[in-house]
Image (cartoon, rainbow, N blue to C red):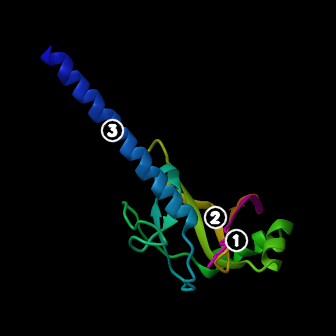
């Protein structure tokens, strides 16, 4: 009887751990997707995220969690300009910019490859361009650097109706 009770406790502990991990992963994804900054400095803090995706992070807050094995990676102005130029050539992005959205951040997505001999190659093959419109809207634009095109746009809007 004691063995069955121990197995139940072990299973419950494992399920609880997986549930907590799933919730934390969801929070991390939301923080990354919703992180918007008005920082115009030439240095972006990038760190590895699950799946080879990199995200900005300078401590806990709007820009990410700031944890992980990554470090500081400087993103050149030329890279940022290239991503912005590719995005601005897309008609849907142009419509967003004409509608009052502003470019707030460029986040590289860096793919890492480990060869059979242990050689590690890192390359920013894609990027995410963050747009915001006042406090009412945010847009996330996925840009393929290699294909020089926008591959996805996500628009989030918020409407607040205050009543007295």
Q: Of callouts 3 and 2, which one flags the residue occurring earlier in the amino acid sequence? A: 3
**CB under 8 Å between callouts 1 and 2?**
yes
Image spot of residue 121 (x, y percent): 51, 56
- Residue placed at 27% from the left, 35% from the top? 13
| Magenta segment boundaries in residue numbering | 149-164
Q: Secondary structure at mark 2?
A: strand
- Image quadrant in which you'd find residue 151: bottom right
Point out which mark residue 83 bears: 1
Residue drawn 46% across and 67% down? 64
Give the number of the disc on residue 16: 3
Residue occupying the far bottom of the picture: 41
Q: Nearer the viewer, residue 52 or 154?
A: 154
Badge 2 is on which residue?
Answer: 127
| Residue sitting at the far right | 91
- Separation of residues labelled 1 and 2 (CA atoms): 7 Å
Mark positioned earlier in the residue sequence (1 or 3): 3
Q: Tag 2: Cα neighbours inside 10 Å, few (<14), some, or many (≥20)?
A: many
Q: Outermost residue toward the top?
A: 1
Determine crowd level at label 1: few under 14, some 14-19, many 20+ residues with C-alpha closer than 10 A: many
What residue is at 86 percent from the left and 68 percent from the top? 91
- Closer to us: mark 3 or mark 2? 3
Numbered circles on residues, count: 3
In the depicted view, which residue is nearer to us: 132 or 84? 132
Q: Position of residue 150 (x, y in %)?
A: 76, 61
The quarter of the picture where residue 161 lies is: bottom right
Horizontal placement of 142 versus 38: left or right? right
Depicted 71 relative to depicted 118: above or below: below
Residue 157 painted magenta: yes
Q: Give percent across and percent down for residue 42.
A: 55, 84
Looking at the rendered structure, the secondary structure element under dot 3 is helix
The Cα–Cα distance between marks 1 and 3, rounded to whole angstroms, is 42 Å
Dot 3 alpha-carbon crowd within 10 angstroms: few under 14, some 14 to 19, many 20 or more: few
């Amino acid at each position: 009887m004691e063995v069955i009770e121990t197995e139940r406790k072990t299973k419950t502990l494992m399920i609880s751990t997986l549930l907590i991990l799933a919730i934390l992963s969801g929070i991390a994804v939301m923080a990354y997707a919703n992180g918007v900054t008005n920082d115009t400095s030439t240095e972006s803090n990038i760190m590895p995220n699950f799946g080879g995706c990199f995200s900005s992070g300078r401590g806990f807050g709007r820009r990410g969690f700031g944890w992980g094995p990554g470090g500081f990676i400087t993103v050149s102005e030329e890279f940022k300009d290239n991503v912005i130029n590719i995005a601005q050539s897309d008609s849907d992005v142009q419509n967003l910019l004409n509608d009052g959205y502003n470019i707030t951040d460029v986040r590289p997505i860096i793919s890492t490859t480990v060869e059979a001999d242990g050689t590690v190659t890192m390359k920013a093959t894609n990027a995410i361009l963050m747009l915001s419109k006042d406090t009412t809207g945010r847009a996330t634009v996925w840009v393929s650097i290699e294909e020089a095109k926008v591959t996805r746009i996500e628009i989030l809007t918020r409407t607040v109706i205050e009543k007295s």
